[in-house]
Image (spheres, rainbow, N blue to C red):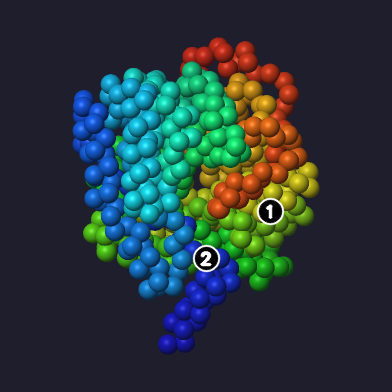
């Protein structure tokens, strides 16, 4: 009885004092059977199917949240990449479909719907091209629609034609929402080695290898890990790893319990647990502060990569012991605008764009929620995407870019995005041009690592 009581009290402490939450329950829905040469029919089928499957998602998640006392912060939906069902639809129709997705999300009361996406890592089909052409306007006229574009994989190399196009798309999307600090770009992620079961936005989509419907869960818990480490100030690094592993185990068990209960009540299969430590703007809920607790005076200084690698590895090991169905991205996110420690590191000149790029070699994703000067050239954005894609391709891992060129803002300015998206210091970029590289086009061939058969 005392053991059960101790465990219960520990969970209460983690929720009330250490920001333990379930970051998201995300329902994945296949829309492949909604394709139709008649756009109006397809548009209505998409709306009807999403609303039918997810009708009780928010209500059920809120019931479970109250019953178990663990907050579920976001209720989300991911769908089949829309480019795959567009067929001969026009750009205008693709934009109309984005509005339909937004309408469904509003009706269902979900925070975001992800999957206004295209997979173009080897080539661009007609439907892909239509979606890419529609992206800037679609993201600027909708509120809850998120998009991702896959431009590279270890097996195929990097589609540099798509990379060039994405730089221009990001610039246009920022300009279309300049009165909102380029917020449309916060809903667009460019991937290398994208995954089919990611529950986190803006990169979630329901991949072709997935079933008809599934519920995926993303946990959080940087605050819990940080507080656990604070109780062991003199531990050596092996012991630090062990503390993180054990703490992540507990977080994951709580997350899987909640996810399975929600899935059961919705009568849909439980999919995966994404173990990623996802920070928020709450005090002591920062990945950067975990790295500083491990031993850095400020995130970004020498030793940051080693500390991040230790933490990311320990998170994966602890989570993998807690769940048989680990998936998604599973590691640690380093979104600048959503992490107070990252923001402080930039403002103190400890954390630079180059260091953030280096950190992506050992963490979950990539350059995430970084505000850039509004005058950054499209070719520079494309080159940043190419660099991140190369890191992912060579290292056989997922990398991504979600950057926001803020119109009218200069290096050192602070921009507010609001809500979970937080605020960010505007960062400058290398002033030298990458135009010739980007304008060459073509494909960067797959590396030797692709030859694994």
In percent of the image, x 42 and y 41: which residue is there? 145
Residues at marks 1 and 2, CA–CA distance in whole angstroms: 18 Å
Q: Is residue 151 above or below residue 328?
A: above
Q: State the quadrant of the C terminus.
A: top left
Q: Is residue 402 above or below residue 260?
A: above
In percent of the image, x 47 and y 22: which residue is there? 162
Q: State the quadrant of the N terminus.
A: bottom left
Whether residue 248 is visible, yes or no, is yes
- Compared across the picture, whether 274 is left or right of 260 comes to right
In percent of the image, x 69 and y 49: which residue is there? 343
Q: Which mark is residue 20?
A: 2
Q: Position of residue 258 (x, y in %)?
A: 38, 65
Q: Position of residue 246 (x, y in %)?
A: 52, 65
Look at the numbered disc 2 and give the secondary structure of its residue. Answer: loop
Quadrant assignment, res 142: top left
Q: Which mark is residue 421?
A: none
Q: In the image shown, does 307 or 63 lie closer to the viewer? A: 63
In percent of the image, x 26 and y 60: which residue is there? 266
Q: Position of residue 361 (x, y in %)?
A: 59, 39
- Compared across the picture, whether 330 is left or right of 422 comes to left
- Compared across the picture, whether 406 is left or right of 143 comes to right
Q: Position of residue 155 (x, y in %)?
A: 42, 27
Around disc 2, counting alpha carbons within 10 Å, would you say few (fewer than 14), some (14 to 19), or many (20 or more)?
many
Whether residue 447 is visible, yes or no, is no
The furthest residue to the bottom? 1
Quadrant assignment, res 236: bottom right
Q: Which residue is labeled 1 in the image?
A: 341
Look at the numbered disc 1 and give the secondary structure of its residue. Answer: helix
Q: In the image shown, does 229 or 106 lie closer to the viewer? A: 106
């Amino acid at each position: 009885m005392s053991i059960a009581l101790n465990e219960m009290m520990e969970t209460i402490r983690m929720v009330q004092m250490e920001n333990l939450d379930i970051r998201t329950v995300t329902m994945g829905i296949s829309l492949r059977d909604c394709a139709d040469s008649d756009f109006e029919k397809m548009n209505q089928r998409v709306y009807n199917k999403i609303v039918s499957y997810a009708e009780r998602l928010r209500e059920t998640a809120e019931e479970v949240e109250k019953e178990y006392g663990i907050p579920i912060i976001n209720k989300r939906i991911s769908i089949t990449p829309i480019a795959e069902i567009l067929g001969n639809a026009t750009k205008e129709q693709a934009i109309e479909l984005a509005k339909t997705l937004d309408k469904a999300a509003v009706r269902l009361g979900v925070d975001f719907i992800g999957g206004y996406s295209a997979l173009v890592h080897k080539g661009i089909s007609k439907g892909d091209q239509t979606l890419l052409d529609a992206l800037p306007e679609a993201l600027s006229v909708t509120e809850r629609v998120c998009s991702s574009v896959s431009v590279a994989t270890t097996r195929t190399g990097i589609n540099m034609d798509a990379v060039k196009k994405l730089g221009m798309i990001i610039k246009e999307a920022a300009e279309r929402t300049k009165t909102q600090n380029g917020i449309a770009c916060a809903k667009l992620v460019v991937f290398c080695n994208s995954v089919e079961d990611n529950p986190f936005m803006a990169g979630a989509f329901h991949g072709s290898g997935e079933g008809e419907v599934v519920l995926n869960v993303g946990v959080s818990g940087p605050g819990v890990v940080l507080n656990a480490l604070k109780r062991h100030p003199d531990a050596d690094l092996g012991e630090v790893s062990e503390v993180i592993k054990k703490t992540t185990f507990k977080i994951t068990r709580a997350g899987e319990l909640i996810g399975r209960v929600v899935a059961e009540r919705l009568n849909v299969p439980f999919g995966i647990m994404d173990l990623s430590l996802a920070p928020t703007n709450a005090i002591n809920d920062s990945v950067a502060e975990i790295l500083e607790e491990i031993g850095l005076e400020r995130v970004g200084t020498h030793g940051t990569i080693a500390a991040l690698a230790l933490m990311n590895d320990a998170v994966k090991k602890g989570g993998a012991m807690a769940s048989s169905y680990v998936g998604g991205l599973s590691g640690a996110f380093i979104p600048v605008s959503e992490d107070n420690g990252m923001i402080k590191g930039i403002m103190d000149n400890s954390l630079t764009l180059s260091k953030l790029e280096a950190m992506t070699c050992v963490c979950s994703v990539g350059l995430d929620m970084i505000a850039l000067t509004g005058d950054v050239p499209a070719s520079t954005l494309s080159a940043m995407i190419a660099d991140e894609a190369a890191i992912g391709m060579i290292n056989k891992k997922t990398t991504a870019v979600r950057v926001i060129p803020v119109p009218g803002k200069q290096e050192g300015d602070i921009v507010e995005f609001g809500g979970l998206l937080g605020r960010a210091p505007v960062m400058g970029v290398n002033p030298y041009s990458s135009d010739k590289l980007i304008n060459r086009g073509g494909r960067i061939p797959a590396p030797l690592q692709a030859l694994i058969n």
